[in-house]
Image: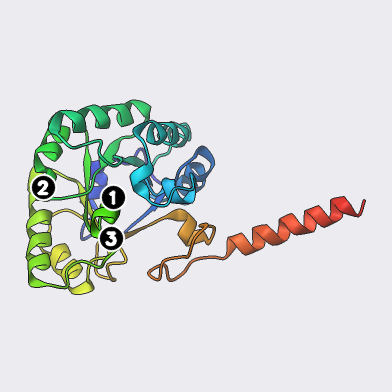
Amino acid sequence: MRAGKTTEADIRGMKGRRRIAALTAYDFAMTKLLDAAGIPLILVGDSLGMVVLGYPDTTHVTLAEMEHHVRAAARAKPQALLAADMPYQTYQSPSAAVESARLLVAAGAQAVKAEGGCAILPQVRAILAAGIPFLGHLGMLPQSVLEEKGYHVKGKTEAERSGLLADAAALAQAGAFGIVLELVTPPVAREITQKSPIPTLGIGAGPDCDGEILVVTDLLGTSPGPIPRHVKKNSRLAEQMGAAIVQWRCSVEQQ
């Protein structure tokens, strides 16, 4: 059992001492469940666009929608560090980034996450200067899916490798407490992890990161779409839930 509220300093301090298991949550009930299970970092992710709101990708998620779901999760009062994604086009300048981050914190988040490295460094510095803890996100960037015409593994070329290493170093130097590495080739994810003074959380990035983060509905098998290949140990709760609902419907119809 945890002694008290998990902070960004606690997450940073887990590097080299304890692997970090992080999951997404989008509401009160799931946040309570994950917190009771001892998950130290819970992310209200903009993946809620696809798994909760029915959007085709994360670019449709609004700041107001993120605030709504952060409030729901925060009502669980988790001991876990509760972080929130900054949605698409809400951090295009330092001032916009700080305004958006402050709204998410006012809704109950204790940290924010945004996608990118050196390209958003002024925004990252502004968020941190405002006293808001920051979690980085490198590799495949879901908010760039339209520009990149799909989801692609990163780190396959030397240019991508060197760019990822530079981005990770810049985020760490700026003061981020961790970095999500999404769909990064395992050798490059390993190299970043070895060189980074802050924890890396892999998602489809091989076994050598400091921890792992997953979309909770992928783990549980309740996502409405296909489960990504990197989710190796997912449950099949959707089938069990469907069977229970059918069984109940039949019992009602036969009364």
Residue 182 x %, y %:
27, 60
Q: Amino acid type of disc 2?
A: Ala
Q: Is residue 185 left or right of residue 44?
A: left
Q: Distance between the residues labelled 1 and 2?
A: 14 Å
- Residue depicted at x 8% and y 71%: 158
Say if 120 sits above or below 200 in the image: above
> Callout 1: helix, strand or loop?
helix
Q: Is residue 240 left or right of residue 236?
A: right
| Three-letter amino acid code at the position of disc 3 | Lys
- Front one among 81 and 64: 64
Q: Where is residue 31 in the image (x, y as percent from the top left)?
A: 47, 43
Of labels 3 and 1, earlier in sequence is 1
Compared with 211, 171 (above or below) is: above
Q: Is residue 99 left or right of residue 79?
A: left
In 3D space, how far apart are the residues under numbered discs 3 and 1 (Cα atoms)?
A: 11 Å
Please provide percent x and percent y for residue 17.
24, 59
Quadrant of residue 88 within the rendered picture: top left
> Residue beneath label 1, please?
143
For disc 3, the marked residue is 149
Q: Residue placed at 48% from the left, 35% from the top?
A: 76
